[in-house]
Image: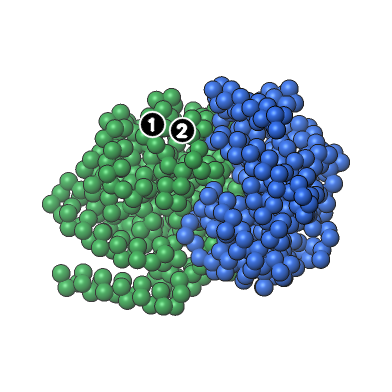
Chain colours: A blue, B green
């Protein structure tokens, strides 16, 4: 077993922007530090929740360098590096490996739809060949609700068997537990590392043989997820998971990224956290009021139990 | 009326690749010249059919400069410049305007789905503001089957009224003539320039008030489309359109980009034209045989008529 690989609770870390919508490095690095200090085992920088797909390649490489220079341990980072274009994915992946990141999370090329497993295989194979670094570890990123380009079981099988020790895991953001269970049942026994993309499936995944979860929710309450992870075999596991689901389902009533940013803005007393790149917009006043009323009710019901 | 704006038959020009899958500038420029010499009024470089979304920003700007240096008139080019990331779209758009291209074709940011009209509006507004060049002319790119991010009638209306003289037209690749007709009926009377993304709707569009078409098919038979365009008010219009549709529907039986590349490879006696970036793969032997048998049958039936 490769003990250098991230395990447990990972947050796809939010990216802060200045009022001009440039990356706010300081605020973002502060958030990365807070996450690592409050329950995250590692961080996916440049995940879907990070608005990574609204960032240029230069913005991503520059931020990553600044984060590491500011003291974030690159061994705790699993950057998202999958882009539509082959040279972009190669550049980002090389850069992350060069900085010492233990793994990268790779979207399939997601513009063209209804492409074949063979075409997607060639894409990943090309990236691996061009990066040409034995330190490379790839986590496939299956998120069909957004990418609209699924990574099939057949494709996982082909990549894992063709590139053993390189294609080492997957983030399954299908949102479909039955699918995640299938992936774990089929590939985890050989050491394939499966992370559901939702905290709703954290306990189930751990029991089935998954490695933790990579969940947007970890941006606001990583400590709770870490408790589930620490206690999954203990008597409190169910209760902790239920609390996780209660909170997670509340968040899901709102557009998730703007809602997470509104919560950070409130808890850090820093309205700049609401800055968000289009095509997203901040929560409306009404949405924000409803969200905070919901969160208040959660706390109240928690205290009453 | 702005006579500098492209009108008539536009090809989203295919991009040739070397065996190493780098852009083959010479082959691609040759193709652009061939298209302009054989019936195209102007060219969309970096459209969907150009595999533009498989290219990096640097590859696109570098190719465009080389094409213009090689003698392609920038006044005949409408580059695709819409990316997921705001800085990428701004960079490509500035570059195209700076080179003298009369318009750009702009995809909405297409990674995040179910975004709002307001978010998409802010995206385009941000690009326009950041480019800040009065020469900028934007054609919106509505291609929901692939982008999965539609440009609604409400959004067109808001952009056209907020940025008159800048947001000047649309390529409608919905593939749905009723939708294209609606767009023309509603916006063309005020001068909005509508191009269906399919040759199947060329004659209908011209009759309704559209400006031509931007069609992948133009890569192989621009002369036929130009005939429809020249004769759309004449007695031969229907027959020419029918022939166009017969050929267009034959092409659509195959994966369009690999099929177009196979046809170019054959007609130019240059197998290198089949090079294609993943996630696409070249036609299989069986597909290629079926395609050429179909094309043969088309020619035969054409001769027999």
Q: Quadrant of the C terminus of chain A?
A: top right
Q: Residues within 10 Å of mark 1 (few under 14, many from 20)?
A: few
Q: Which chain does the numbered disc 2 sit on?
A: B
Which residue is the site of mark 1?
B154
Q: Is residue A139 visible?
A: no
Task: Name the side, left or right, on which B259 lies relative to B190.
Answer: right
Q: Is residue A98 above or below residue B269?
A: above
Q: Earlier in the sequence, mark 1 or mark 2?
A: 2
Which residue is the site of mark 2?
B117
Q: Is residue A220 above or below residue A45?
A: above
Residue A198 percent across, percent down from the top left: 64, 48
Number of callouts:
2
Q: Secondary structure at mark 1?
A: helix
Task: Name the side, left or right, on which A9 lies relative to B129.
Answer: right
The residue at the point 30 percent across, 58 percent down is B223
Q: CA distance from mark 1 to mark 2?
A: 8 Å
């Amino acid at each position: 077993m490769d003990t250098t690989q991230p395990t447990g609770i990972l947050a796809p870390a939010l990216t802060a922007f200045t009022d001009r919508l440039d990356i706010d490095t300081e605020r973002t690095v502060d958030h990365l530090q807070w996450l690592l200090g409050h329950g995250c085992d590692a961080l996916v920088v440049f995940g879907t929740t990070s608005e990574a797909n609204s960032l240029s390649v230069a913005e991503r490489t520059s931020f990553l360098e600044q984060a590491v220079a500011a003291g974030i341990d690159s061994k705790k980072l699993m950057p998202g590096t999958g882009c539509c274009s082959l040279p972009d994915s190669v550049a980002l992946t090389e850069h992350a490996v060069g900085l010492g990141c233990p793994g990268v999370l790779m979207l399939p090329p997601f513009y063209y739809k209804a492409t074949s497993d063979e075409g997607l295989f060639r894409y990943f194979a090309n990236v691996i060949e061009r990066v040409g670094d034995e330190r490379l570890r790839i986590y496939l990123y299956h998120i069909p609700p957004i990418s609209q380009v699924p990574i099939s079981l057949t494709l996982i099988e082909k990549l894992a068997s063709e590139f053993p020790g390189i294609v080492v895991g997957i983030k399954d953001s299908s949102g479909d537990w039955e699918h995640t269970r299938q992936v774990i049942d089929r590939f985890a026994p050989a050491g394939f590392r499966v992370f559901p993309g939702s905290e709703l499936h954290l306990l189930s995944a751990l029991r089935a043989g998954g490695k933790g979860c990579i969940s947007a929710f970890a941006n606001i309450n990583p400590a709770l997820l870490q408790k589930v992870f620490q206690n999954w075999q203990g008597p409190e596991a169910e209760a902790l998971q239920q609390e996780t689901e209660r909170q997670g389902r509340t968040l899901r009533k709102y557009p998730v990224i703007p809602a997470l940013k509104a919560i950070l803005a409130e808890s850090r007393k820093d309205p700049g956290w609401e800055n968000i790149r289009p095509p997203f917009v901040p929560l409306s006043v009404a949405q924000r009021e409803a969200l905070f009323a919901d969160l208040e009710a959660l706390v109240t019901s928690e205290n009453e139990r």
